[in-house]
Image (spheres, coloured by chain):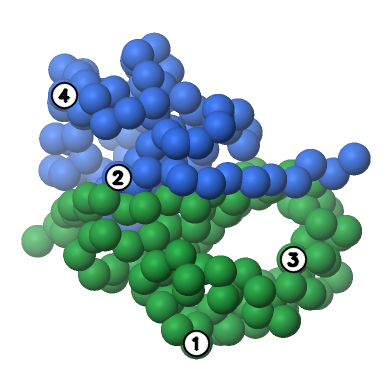
Chain colours: A green, B blue
Amino acid sequence: MIAQTPSPPYYAVIFTSIRTDKEDDYAQTARLMLELAQQQDGFLGIESARDTLGITVSYWRDLASIQNWKQQTDHLVAQQKGKTDWYKHYKTRIALVERDYGFDLQ
Amino acid sequence: MIAQTPSPPYYAVIFTSIRTDKEDDYAQTARLMLELAQQQDGFLGIESARDTLGITVSYWRDLASIQNWKQQTDHLVAQQKGKTDWYKHYKTRIALVERDYGFDLQ
């Protein structure tokens, strides 16, 4: 659930969104995009949560792997559908992870 | 809901967590920490969502403002309680936001 990422530096794509109430094939497409992302070169992990706001953070080796994923054909179709049907608002932030630390209950 | 952050560069603190089933004063403390964070110098915004996983992303002007918030006294107490009571696992990632772009439904 919490992504097992390597030691920094690596990149994070923080995608924050508010959905419309259109369902269509949103859930199916979201599952497909998750599967496709995981197959991309440079993919390191993903974390996702939604209540009113949705936040998905995907982790990548470098900017080139993020750019390749952004231009992947099926993903381009989904991005377009996101704008026309599924999202009221979204924001994408590309960020270089410089440090990380964690805690696991023993 | 989606944070209105200034133009990059700025910093993101990505806090991903899995809760225990202990409630205690978690909700009250979470609200208090949100209020306190917003009063910190350098605070730019915050986004939060939880279903199985919780993701909170707070945005900051620079590393110094993140460090000051990490060391804020009440926040230190809450961090300790997080480890002993509220979280099974968490991971914190400090990331420099280099680019952002968005979409708003007209």
State the residue position of label 2: B94
- Please state which amino acid type lies under the numbered disc 2: Ile
Q: Which mark identifies residue B7?
A: none
> Dot 1: within a 10 Å radius of its alpha carbon, few (fewer than 14), some, or many (20 or more) residues?
few
State the residue position of label 4: B71
State the residue position of label 3: A79
- Please state which amino acid type lies under the numbered disc 4: Gln
Whole-Å distance between the Cαs marked 1 and 4?
A: 40 Å
Whole-Å distance between the Cαs marked 3 and 4?
A: 40 Å
At x 66% / y 74%, what residue is drawn?
A71
Q: Where residue A10 appears, x then y in whole percent?
A: 32, 62
At x 42% / y 58%, what residue is drawn?
A12
Whole-Å distance between the Cαs marked 4 and 2?
A: 15 Å
Query: Which mark's residue is nearer the viewer, 4 or 2?
Result: 2
Q: Earlier in the sequence, mark 4 or mark 2?
A: 4
Query: Which mark's residue is nearer the viewer, 1 or 4?
Result: 1
Tags 2 and 1 touching, CB below 8 Å? no
- Please state which amino acid type lies under the numbered disc 3: Gln
Say if B80 sits above or below A33 in the image: above
> Dot 3: within a 10 Å radius of its alpha carbon, few (fewer than 14), some, or many (20 or more) residues?
some
Determine if marks 4 and 2 fall on one subunit. Answer: yes
> Dot 2: within a 10 Å radius of its alpha carbon, few (fewer than 14), some, or many (20 or more) residues?
many
Q: Earlier in the sequence, mark 3 or mark 1?
A: 1
Say if B93 sits above or below B13 in the image: below
Q: Secondary structure at mark 1?
A: helix
Chain letter, disc 1 residue: A
Chain letter, disc 2 residue: B
